[in-house]
Image (spheres, rainbow, N blue to C red):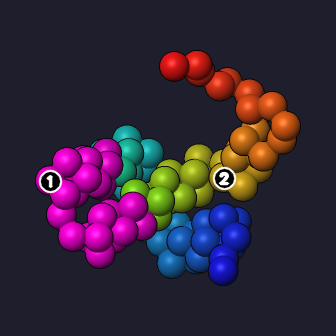
Amino acid sequence: MMEIREFQELIARRYKARDQERGVPRTFMWFVEEVGELATALATGTDRANIEEEFADVFAWLCTLANITDVDLETACAKYTGDRVKGFKPK
């Protein structure tokens, strides 16, 4: 299995230069498009393989956004790994 940081670094090695040229606003639009595709897959009950692919795409684009804004996702996610989740919103 791969750690979050390892995956983010893999995405950076492959795509960061091109993603930085595209910039945050346009990259964010790609991310939103992928979230929309995931929403469609979940809503339509498409096959499991497609749903998994869309989750992977969303995560990859999230890593891309984190890379071009200098955010370490593993560090950012630390708020969820302690005893008390910060920012928890009750139902």
34 in magenta: yes
Residue 25: which disc? none
The percent coordinates of residue 82 (x first, y second) are 83, 41
Residue at numbered disc 1: 44
Q: Is residue 52 left or right of residue 67?
A: left
Question: In front: 39, or 61?
Answer: 39
Residue 86 percent across, percent down from the top left: 74, 27
Q: Which callout, 1 or 2, points at the residue further toward the start of the chain?
A: 1
Q: Which portion, as a residue range, is magenta?
A: 32-57
Number of disc labels: 2
What residue do we see at 47% from left, 72% from top? Answer: 15
The residue under label 1 is which amino acid type? Thr
Query: For the residue marked with disc 2, what is the amino acid?
Result: Leu
Residue that badge 2 annotates: 73
Residue 16 in view, yes or no: yes
In the image, is 84 to the left or to the right of 89? right
